[in-house]
Image (spheres, rainbow, N blue to C red):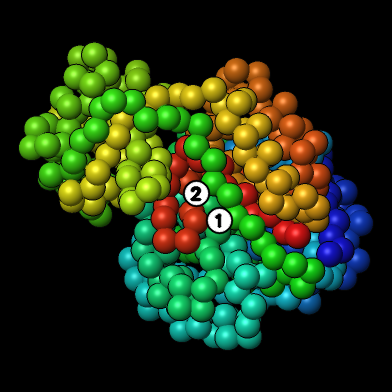
Amino acid sequence: MNYKIGKSNNSNPDIAMREATAHLKNPKLVLFFSGVDDFAHYACKIKTSFPEAISMGATTFAAFCKEGAYKDTLMVIGFEDGIQCEASLLKDADKYPLKYVDQVEKTADRFKKPENTICLEFSSALISCEELVLSTLNAVLSKKKIPVFGGSSGDRGRAEKTIVALNGETYQNACVFVIIENLGGKIRLYRENIYKPTQHYFKSTKVDVKKRVVYEYDNKPAAKVMATALGVTIGELPKYLDSYPLGRIIGNEMFIVANNQVVNGSGMEYHARVYNNSQMVLLEPDDYKTVLQKTLDQVNRECNRPSLTLMVNCLARSILFESNGDLNAFATRVGSALGNYVGFAGYGEQLNEQHFNQTMVLAVFE
């Protein structure tokens, strides 16, 4: 696989664009990440500079590569060869993405080796569209056994505005996706949780699925159940929400659901859907450095010569690492173990049929 990674934090967007793309010659696919302010400018310029390439991007809290974590930076990766790819988008992502399911079918038609193929998607954040997007993509791709991997776009962490882009056009209410076949081998997918279960398990018994609000656990007010489990009052609960998410249990797997806020003193609003009769568990922080080492060891055991890794590292995880002074060390540690990679930080992560939060997902190309 032949690719080039570039970056620039120059405050002049035209200079940043030239510096970040200086080594690209004739890419088939360009992925890019930046902050919100100059993102539309970069989207347009990249398409103008490489009109024959698919270009796809997302706004981010921080961009990652083996040299470190970078904020207020344009990061670009251009794939020159070693892949086949086709891209499209789902509009009206929070309302009717299923209208565009034929776009998924047309895009996926040419791919015949699912073990070497993924659908990489970037979804608009802050509009609760991710589950609708995943159901649309998987209506086609699950039959073809093509896994879905990606994340929601990000911003500075203030939940103000996020953007995605495809081929020079920008969107705040869409999913952009590209199906990528690795011509050199398989693509392996990994998911890392840095929170562990406590002894507190609940069942959701009254839910507004679309609004992502749980009103009752075990037929009791959800906020009261949470506060009791944490040993605090409902008034004190907001101080604990970032550190104590919930896990939604599906079979032998657990997916993190981040707390958003207490609703009317009794309900709990989340950043991912919880369904009626979901089995839930209160989570607490684990030792994230130890967990990361186990993840990296597993990747190296199973894929000892990765050529490239794509990462989505949740915005909330990134803020946690930054608050502890570990964000750059985290980024370089991943690079030391896996080699070249690029990643971004947004408001959610997606893998196959599931949307979740406060997680890292990796797509490792052999």
Q: Is residue 347 above or below residue 151?
A: above
Residue at the disc numbered 1: 150
The N terminus lies in which quarter of the figure? bottom right
Q: Secondary structure at mark 2?
A: strand
Residue in front for this viewpoint, 160 or 70:
70
Residue 198 horizontal side relative to residue 334, left or right: left
Measuring from the top left, give residue 126's x and y in whole percent. Answer: 41, 48
Question: What residue do we see at 73% from left, 45% from top?
Answer: 300
**Identity of the amino acid at label 2?**
Glu
Confirm or deny contact between disc 2 and disc 1 (CB under 8 A): yes
Residue at the disc numbered 2: 349
Question: What residue do we see at 60% from left, 26% from top?
Answer: 290
Callout 1: few (<14), some (14-19), or many (20+) C-alpha neighbours within 10 Å?
A: many
Residue in front for this viewpoint, 308 or 235:
308
Quarter of image, res 333: top right
**Identity of the amino acid at label 1?**
Gly
Callout 2: few (<14), some (14-19), or many (20+) C-alpha neighbours within 10 Å?
A: many
